[in-house]
Amino acid sequence: MSDGCVYLVGAGPGDPGLMTIRGRDLLNRADAVVYDHLAARRLLAEAPPQAEMIYVGKQAAAHTLKQEEINALLVRLGLEGKQVVRLKGGDPFVFGRGGEEALALVEAGVAFEIVPGITAGIAAPAYAGIPVTHRNVTSCMALITGHETPDKEESDLDYASLANWPGTLGFYMGVKNLPKIASSLIEHGMDPQTPAALVRWGTTTRQETVTGTLDNITEVATQAGIKPPALIVVGHVVALRENISWFENRPLFGKRIVVTRARLQASRVTRQLEELGAEVVELPAIRIEPPADPAPLDRAAAELASVDWVVFTSANGVDAFFGALKRADLDSRALAGVRICVIGPGTARRLGQFGLQADAQPKTYKAAEISQTLADIDDLSGKKIICPRADIAPKDLVVDLEALGADVTDIAAYRTVGETPEPELLDELFEDGGPDWITFTSSSTVTNFVNAVGIDRLRASSASLASIGPVTSGTMRSLDFEPDVEAVSHTIPGLVEAILQAQTQREQ
C-alpha cells in the first residue's frame, strides 16, 4: 500500500449543509479533489487553496472522462502519496459507481475509505414535502435506476414486480425514459391513478416539483419543461405533499440574490438569505488584505498604555487589531483600562469573540454618530483615541473627534481591494434579465461591483438593488443608481429584512 489514501465521499444531494461532518473534515485537508457535475460547488471552497482541483463530471452524452479513466486517475493520485477526496453527488454507492472505483483501488493496492452521503432518493422527496415512508401509507421504498447501461440488450428492471411493489418507487436519472417507465408500470398492472412526482434539482434553491398521476405525469413534466437532473417518485405518499410542502414555500424561494461582500464575510448574509429560500450567488466585489505598512498598527497595539479609547468601525478592524496584538505577544489583557467603542452589533459580536464587551455603541450604526456617542460619555479634550480602519475609510470621523479636542490616530489596519469576477460568471449571471436582487453592504462594494459589471449592463438588468444604509445609498446615487430598498437597521439582518418586506409586498 502507498502512503496515499482515496476517500470516496458522498457530497449529498445538492444542499451544501447536508454533507456529513466527516466528508467536510476530509475536504478541509485534501491534497486533491476529484469532483462530479452534481457535487455542490460551494463545497469546493472547503478544500485548502493549494489543493489540486480536478473536474470529472459526467452529463448525458458529455463525459469529461470515461469511468475507466477516472479509476486510473484515482489510482495514480493515490500512488503518488496524496490524500484524495473523490467528491460524488449523493452517496458513492447509490448509483454513483463508487463500487467500481473502490474495486480499482483495491486492485492497485491503494488505501481507501467510503464516506456515505445523503442520497437524492430520500432527500429530494423530503425537500418536496413527500415522505418516502408513512406508517398509514407505506412502510417500504425502492431505489431504482431509470438509466441503465446503454450496452444492455434487455432491461434488468422487473416491471411486473415493480408494478406490484407495495411501497414508494424512486427512479434516478429517468427523465428521458419517463414515458417508458410510466407506461411499463401501467402495462404490468399498476393503477394509472397512482400519484407521481418529479423533483428537479432537489434540495437546492433551484428545486422544482411537479405532480400528477402515472397516466399523465409525462405530459405534466413535458409541459413544465422538466429536464435532468430530476428524481421520479411514484406512490401514494406523493399525495401528502399538498400538506407537507415546506421548502418551496419559503418567502424568498427561487429568488436569485447577489452578495457582493468580501468572501470571508459573505457567509452570514448568505446563510440568512438561503434560510429564506433564496438562491445566493456570492460575487465578491472586494477582498480584505493586510495594510501596505503594518508598522503603525503594530506600534499602536504595543503602546496601549497611553490610549483612552479604541474605536472599531468594522469587524475587519477588530480582526486586524487583535492580529497586531498577537504579533506583539499580547492578548486582550493589554486593553485593561482602555475603553472601546464599536459602530454596531456585528462589530460588537466580533469583539465578543475575543472576550470583550464594548463600552459604547451609537444608537444608529453610522460612523457620523460615533463622535457624539463618545462625547456623551466622556470629555474628549486631550483624550488619545486610535481608530483601526480600512485604508479608504472617510476622514469625517477623525475630523469630528478632533473637533471635540481628541488626539486621534487614524490607522490603516487593512486594505479594501477590488475583486474582478470572471467574465464567464458575469455573462451567466446577467442572462435573461439578470438576478432578482443585488446587495451592497458598503460604498466600496458599490464602486467595485459597478466597475466590474459595467454601468450599461447593470442598468439594463431587471435586478433590484438593496443598500445596507445611507452612506452606501449615497455612493449608489453618485453613480446614478437609486436603491430599491435601504435597510432601516444598518446591519445584515436589517438588509435581509428590507429585501424580505419588499419582496413580500410585490407578491401580495
Image (cartoon, rainbow, N blue to C red):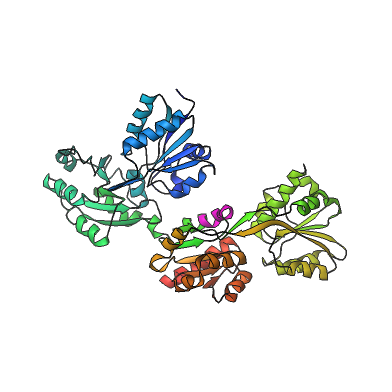
Image point (48%, 70%), residue name? 458
Q: Position of residue 240 (x, y in %)?
A: 30, 52
Q: Quick check: 51 left or right of 246? A: right
Q: Main secondary structure of the magenta part?
A: helix
Q: Quick check: 409 left or right of 212? A: right
Q: Nearer the viewer, residue 488 or 104?
A: 104
| Picture quarter with the N terminus | top left
Q: Does 90 appear in magenta?
A: no
Q: Position of residue 233 (x, y in %)?
A: 26, 48
Q: Quick check: 362 left or right of 417? A: right
| Picture quarter with the C terminus | bottom left
Q: Position of residue 65 (x, y in %)?
A: 34, 41
Q: Which residues are magenta?
A: 263-270
Residue 278, visible in the rendered structure: no
Q: Is 151 drawn above or below residue 195 in the view shown?
A: above
Q: Position of residue 488 (x, y in %)?
A: 59, 69
Image point (80%, 53%), residue name? 300
Residue 101, visible in the rendered structure: yes
Image point (70%, 47%), residue name? 354
Q: Nearer the viewer, residue 337 or 100?
A: 100
Image point (81%, 53%), residue name? 338
